[in-house]
Image (cartoon, helix red, strand yellow):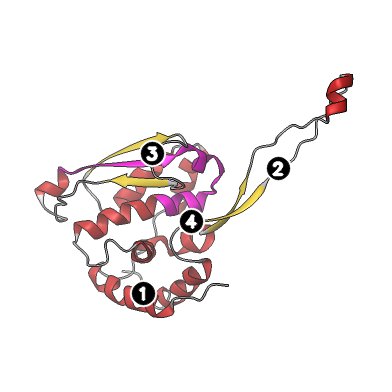
């Protein structure tokens, strides 16, 4: 078992909470879940964007496996010169988020919320020029502070169930007596840059704060 990086988590949280205005209340999970059930993922992005009070332009693209960073379920493209939050330049900023179709096909509700919240939190930290904006663990912690703690608790680890496959033995094929033998491959997956134990530890710290 990996060691929980308690010192790093304590230090990051101490720097992030004041900069983000305290621990926030979560978004409406029921509304998000309804969109998830109908595969309206762009609507989920819109709700989370509004919950994070981001008012820049945002485009969402859904991509195949061979596109973008390897193994990344989602990613966001932002310009190099990043305007500060609250400025006219920020409102005119155009950002693109990409989400991998294969990830959406297998990930549960909470995990999809985490992926979206994490990417949009990159925008939040860049928009306030936070010193930890390039640290991925800090982005996860910031997303938890901004209201997504319970989603991280439930969705940071999940089972990926691969579609059923059909197999036939060579002699069944030869004799024309092919028999369907369905099976599923189940893989335990993680999302984010904190281990599940670190998510649990950070949650304990954040639960001591009254949501703003």
Tell me whether circle 3 and circle 1 mark residues in contact (CB < 8 Å).
no
Residue 131 lies in quadrant? bottom left
**Can you name the residue that lies furthest to the top here?**
176
**Does residue 105 show up magenta in the picture?**
yes
* Distance from Cα at disc 1 to Cα at disc 2: 44 Å
Mark 2–mark 4 Cα distance, whole angstroms, equals: 21 Å
Q: Position of residue 163 (x, y in %)?
A: 65, 38
Q: Which residue is labeled 2 in the image?
A: 184
The residue where tag 4 is placed is 191
Q: Is mark 2 on a helix, strand or loop?
A: loop
Q: In what element is the residue under mark 3?
A: helix
Mark 3 vs mark 1, foreground winner is 3
Q: Do the residues labelled 3 and 2 touch (CB within 8 Å)?
A: no
Q: Quadrant of residue 183?
A: top right
State the residue position of label 1. 210
Percent x, y of residue 122: 30, 55
Mark 4 or mark 1, which is nearer to you?
4
Query: In the picture, residue 5 is in which quadrant?
Result: bottom left
Horizontal arrangement in the rendering, residue 188 relative to residue 90 (left or right)? right
Q: Which residue lies under the disc numbered 3?
A: 42
Q: Nearer the viewer, residue 19 or 96?
A: 96
Local SS, label 1: loop
Is residue 114 on the magenta stretch?
yes
Q: Is residue 135 above or below residue 39?
A: below
Instruction: State which region is magenta.
Output: 92-115
Q: Mark 3 or mark 4: name the one nearer the start of the chain.
A: 3
Do callouts 1 and 2 mark residues in contact (Cβ within 8 Å)? no
Marks 4 & 1, CB-CB < 8 Å contact: no
């Amino acid at each position: 078992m990996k060691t929980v990086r308690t010192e790093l988590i304590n230090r990051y949280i101490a720097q992030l909470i004041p900069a983000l205005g305290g621990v926030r209340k979560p978004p409406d999970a029921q509304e998000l879940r309804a969109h998830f059930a109908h595969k309206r993922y762009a609507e989920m992005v819109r709700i989370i964007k509004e919950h994070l009070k981001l008012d820049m332009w945002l485009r969402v693209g859904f991509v195949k496996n061979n596109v973008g960073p390897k193994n990344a379920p989602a990613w966001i493209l932002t310009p190099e010169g990043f305007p500060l939050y609250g400025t006219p330049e920020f409102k005119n900023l155009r950002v693109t988020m990409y989400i991998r179709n294969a990830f959406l096909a297998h990930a549960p509700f909470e995990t999809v919320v985490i992926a979206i919240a994490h990417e949009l939190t990159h925008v939040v930290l860049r928009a306030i020029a936070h010193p930890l904006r390039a640290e991925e663990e800090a982005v996860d912690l910031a997303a938890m502070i901004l209201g997504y703690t319970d989603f991280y608790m439930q969705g940071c680890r999940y089972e990926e169930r691969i579609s059923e496959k059909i197999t036939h033995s060579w002699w069944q094929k030869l004799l024309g007596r092919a028999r369907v033998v369905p099976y599923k491959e189940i893989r335990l997956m993680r999302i984010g840059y904190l281990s599940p134990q670190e998510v649990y530890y950070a949650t304990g710290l954040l639960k001591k704060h009254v949501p703003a």
